[in-house]
Amino acid sequence: MSERFDEIISRTGTFCTQWDYTEDRFGEKDIIPFSISDMDFQSPPEILHAIKERTNHGVFGYTRWNHHSFKASISGWYKERFSAHIEDDWIVYSPSVIYTISKLIELLTEEEDAIVMQLPAYDAFFNQIKTSKRELLKNNLIYKEGKYHLDYDDLENKLAYRKTKVLLLCNPHNPTGRVWTKEELVKIIELCECHDVKVISDDIHMDVVYDGHSYTPVTSVTKNLDNVYVCTSASKTFNTPGLGGSYAFIPNEKIREQFLNVIKFQDGLSSASIFGILAIMEGYQHAAYWVDELKSYLYNNMKMVKDFIDRELPDLKFTMPESTYLAWIDCSGLNKTSSELQNSLVQNGKVGIMSGDVYGAEQGPFLRMNIGCPEAKVLEGLKRLKLSIDLL
């Protein structure tokens, strides 16, 4: 039912980060954005109905997350969608994935310890590592014929460094759209276990994986569960980041108790948003069909990007991603700098597309274009991209 995703819904004037605050990222107000990772679609009707019912109830007191209904909705989703076994006891609530990663870094490492990360990478990771006073070790992905591959030799060298304590993984990978295969994950885990390095995996894009590829949580590829941590959320899946809330899998009982103590007693953040909790439970229990429809629509959007670039922009290269609604576009054939490209996009095309420099792309320039929106917006963005390049 593409009609539900074709609908144009104005988000301006709603305090929307992507639409109302483009000046923060691009220096201009009147541009069409394809930036921050949320979508321009309404959430599933089951979630909207549950929120309306709860709003009509009218009492918004403190909300408990630590109960069977919440945890069973998550473990049931993993069983049905990914054939993955998740113990209810592993599951903890967190205000956000970034918060979870930050606290796990604090619990698993000391200042000046090293954290390994594949580049390019989600930009928030850089700031997390820097502000926590940890050392970043870059494990650059190998870019070959439009696809990214792991550099195992370099990875092992970085893991063997005496200060390395954590590998910060992103699966599926933002911004490249790779989904690490089970075989790749097994190899990663083996290397980490060999060098006694913990794995923190950000899996927030897990539900948008296209046909021919499959997502596997790291908890499914190791027997040593004490050393793996999965941080994720339903917010990307159902377009609900504004409702708050995420969750994590922490099989290590000692670290799990420490995390729960920090979130409750130190940071005072263990009381959840009722709307965030409802969105997770309703989405996972009743909206699997909606996710399947969403993936089909997003894939068609990606195909539109591919066809347009191949036909209209021969100096650009775009490989269909394995996951996410983030189109990672290779603009190196333009022989222009990222600054020159961004200036033309904003000034000439009046379009906001994220620069690959933000994510540490070194082969560039690249663009990361969010296509989680109606087809008409994607097409308009592509036309503006072409105009921007024509006027470079």
Image (tube, rainbow, N blue to C red):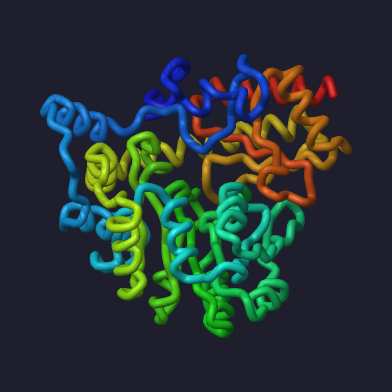
Q: How far across and down, in percent of the image, does residue 178 sit?
A: 59, 55
Q: Is residue 102 left or right of residue 272?
A: right
Q: Which one is in front, 305 or 88?
A: 88
Looking at this view, name the residue that lies furthest to the front.
Answer: 266
* Identity of the residue furthest to the bottom in this view: 194
| Residue 103 image point, x, y percent | 43, 60
Q: Residue at x 64, y 33 (%)?
A: 305
Q: Quadrant of the C terminus?
A: top right
Query: Going 55% across and 22% down the picture, which residue do you hit?
Result: 377
Q: Residue at x 65, y 35 (%)?
A: 354
* Camera-side residue of 62 and 333: 62
Query: In the displayed structure, would residue 359 be above or below residue 215?
Result: above
Can you see residue 50? yes
Above or below, 196 against 81 in this view is: below
Image quarter of the N terminus: top left
Marker count (numbered): 0
The residue that appears at 19% across and 33% down in the rendered structure is: 50
Residue 8 appears in view: no
- Residue that protrudes farthest toward the right in the picture: 335
Residue 51, position in %: x, y? 22, 31
Q: Is residue 209 left or right of residue 127?
A: left
